[in-house]
Image (cartoon, rainbow, N blue to C red):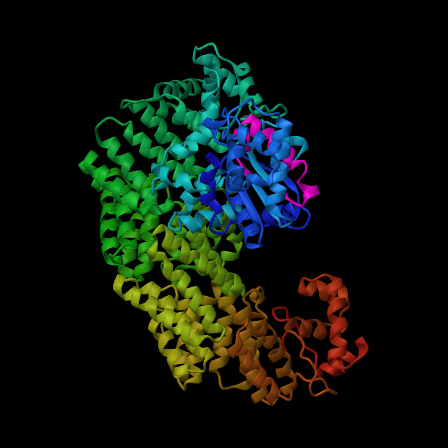
Amino acid sequence: MADRGASGAVADALIGREADLRLLRARLRVGTGGGALLLSGEAGVGKSAVLDELAGVALADGARVLKAAGVEFEAGCGYSCLNQVLFPLLGGLDVLDATLRDALRTALGFDGGRPPEPLLVSNAVLRLLQTAAGGDPLLIVVDDLHWVDRASARVLAFVARRVTGLGMSFVAAARSGEPCPGGYSAALVPYELPPLDEESATRLLGSRFPGLARGARRRLLAEAGGNPLALLELPAALRPDAEDSPAVLPLSSRLETLFGSRVAELPAATRHVLLIAALEGTGDLGVLRAAADRDGRGYGLEDLAPVERARLVHIEEGTRKLTFRHPLIRSAVVGQAPSGERRAVHAALARVLTDRPERRAWHLGEATLEPDEEVAALLEQAAGLALRRGDAAGAMRTLIRSAALTPEGPHRGRRLAEAAYLGAESTGALSSARRLLDDARRAAPQAEDSLHSATASALLVLNGDGDVTTAHRLLHSAVESAAAAHGYRAEDKALVDALHVLAVICFFGARPGLWRSYHRVVERLTPEPPAILAVLGRTFSDPARTGAAAHAQLDVLMDSLGGEADPVRITRVGTGALYLDRLGEVREAAWQVVRKGRDGGPARRYISALIHLCLDDYLTGGWDEALELAREGLRACEEHGYRAFAWYFRYVTAIVLGARGQADESLATAEAVIGWAARHGAPCAAHYAHHAAAVASLGRGDFALAYDHAAAVSPAGTLASHVPHALWVAAHLVEAAVRSGRRAEAAAHVRALRDADVAALSSRHAMLVEASAALCTEDDEEARRLFALALAIPGSDRWRFDRARVRLAYGERLRRARATAESRVVLRAALATFEDLGARPWAERAEKELRAAGWSRRRPDAAHAPELSAQEWEVARLAASGLPNKQIAERLFLSHRTVGAHLYRIYPKLGITSRAMLRDALGARDDVPGRPPPPPP
């Protein structure tokens, strides 16, 4: 009855079994001719649940269902399973003639006498079933067929071979690979029930254990291998923090019964070699052979023959690799081995893996019971190797093991503190970080003064109920004390890590005084400051004044990212690129970090990469993706406890919603961020929120409110010191000032932008500085010159929303200067972009200006013609200008066939029949948003 446990895995909704059930019902044909099936699958895969569902559906459809199951300890008791099947019908035995009735009663043990002939019993059962069915549908369900007694199996096989002709249906279930008595292979059509696919397994795990952390969920999915019962049972073996969980998860008693019994039956030599394979982990036969030779027991790979025959492992001759047929077999092997034998195998593997230091150190750690500084030091080195390849969680686990094997003294506290730092800064194990910090202080009181301890504590304060000032005070004093005591060494990893966290805290605080200790220490690092720390000091602190000077250093860092695998380095470079508008250059690497994060990689880095992608998406017009990634980021912050970084994703949500016209929701979200920022002393978060609120207010036409929000970041006429986001609201402040009658304030702000040479930061800032100046001037010719200059900035077409807003302002100015034909060109380009982005308020403004300029969406000859989509307008305008389909396709990044298909739809919408008629139908030539011709003088 063991598979009955898997019913719980899928009984409620049979997650992931919809397709299997459809196929099985179609083949069983209950009530429509009948059929006979053998459902097979590994232990715990959910065969019993599927049988229960088939029986339930048949009952609901009006069929009679007879159920039975093989029982291991009744396998030697003749006709015991048949007794289960027929028990509901025993009161109707009188319908049989005397010979058949007597034979069946004797077989079932109700009468004494000589055992009846099997054929006589089989015919009696068949006749009884026919009579009981009475022409109505009948389904016979037999579970655990491999444990059905032989006498019952022969009779049931006899019945199964004949059900189709009698309109009955028969389905049985058995474990894959188990011999079934009774000759069922010829009687039943086989169907192998596969493990759940990854999506279904994830749904099942989430429905039963919704609070599992991402890393724990990922590990359980891998260990369970799609086995529903394992998905329900294994979570009990997993500690809340993944770094505390054993390397091989122990099996529950139910899983041990299913998987461990097959291992226990193997010869001792086979179990031992299998243990080597289970602990070695990669299946390398060369390593397995060498380890078997080293442990002195005289066993070898030839002892694996029984386990191959039992189909518990597979050996691939080509790659010389051993793989377990199911991950839980590996768990069963390790779980059944005595601890002394496991340590001996680890020691043998360590002796063999001399050329693989990380794996050798891990095996030595598992083989060692008493404190051993040499082994602990090797484990610490292995943790460093894990960090360099981006495995922060693995490094944290290794450091914890290193500390456990460290003799009493300062090294134990130092290693625990570093593990705590990794938990707080990278892996998302904040609760473990707190515990490890306490352990570090108990192990070595002086560990409280270590940089890793202080850095971890500052991060915990930042993500808890503390504030930025407290976190800064805690960390900056530790940084300066450590640097003064141990030297300003650029190769001091703890010092460099602490400075990176200090930069984040200073950024959150957005005050010049907070950055002084950072600059003081970085400038004194020898032989020279690491490039990324130098770049952060310029671009992340006060980019309006120092950012442009960092371009050259950032170029070198960008060039070094090719093939980079370390998520820490990738995200640190991305942070340095943020206010120089160069996040697009790290997109590919950031996506690499996100994919790792989704698979359980460092949570803090995963969140940082999501932030960078969201911000770049907003600037470049990937708004749908920005909202999707923001939702993902909020979930990650909630799941891993990084509450101090959730405001980034709320900002992205607020600013996109505001730009799309959902002002109320945008402003409410912004206010929530402003409230959080006030409670935690994080004005930077408030600056971002004010930016989002300014965009929402501009969209709804409340220019006075937009001005107030923009000025809350940086007053008009100045770029507030060490307020990086003053750059991002500058153009909004100028527009809001002009439109609310504050021309003097707007002009003062443009002067501040020019004095700071903000245009040197990026093409976006260069475009917005010229456009802001154009808004301020009352001279129409000067305004036209400045707008044209803004739109001609190389690379400015990347910033779709900002560029479309510049075009809108330019078109408005042209129309008011009575240059209506010119205004239609830029206004229609702006409209196309706004419509593509879903920026409804700006699209409505652009369309209103176009109508005032004499433009209409309607066809010249049809008042109610269907409108062109934004992309159709772009194709039509380019075709009207004389470009062939191939060049249009290159301009719009389409195939020439897609361009042809667009034109095929455009002609009837415009009431024309040829390409030559497009120019007149459109009224004026227009261009593709983001790729204009040289603007008019």
Q: Quadrant of the C terminus?
A: bottom right
Residue 746, by quadrant, is: bottom left
- Residue 325 visible from this viewpoint: no
Name the residue nearer the viewer: 467 or 398: 398
Q: Residue furthest front?
A: 98
Question: Does the magenta-highlighted stretch encompass residue 231?
Answer: no
Residue under the image location 51 percent in, 25 percent down: 112
Residue 333's place in the image compared with 815, above or below, is above
Residue under the image location 33 percent in, 34 percent down: 399
Q: Position of residue 373 (x, y in %)?
A: 29, 24
Q: Left or right of 610: which side holds 904?
A: right
Q: Position of residue 911 (x, y in %)?
A: 77, 82
Q: Position of residue 126 (x, y in %)?
A: 63, 37
Q: Position of residue 351 (x, y in %)?
A: 42, 17
Query: Disc count in the image?
Result: 0
Q: Give the range drawn in magenta.
A: 142-169
Residue under the image location 42 percent in, 24 percent down: 360
Residue 195, by quadrant, is: top right
Residue 719's place in the image compared with 26, above or below, is below
Q: Magenta-highlighted stretch: main secondary structure? A: helix
Residue 613's place in the image compared with 816, above or below, is above
Name the residue nearer the viewer: 214 or 403: 214
Residue 238's place in the image compared with 313, above or below, is below
- Residue 313 visible from this viewpoint: yes
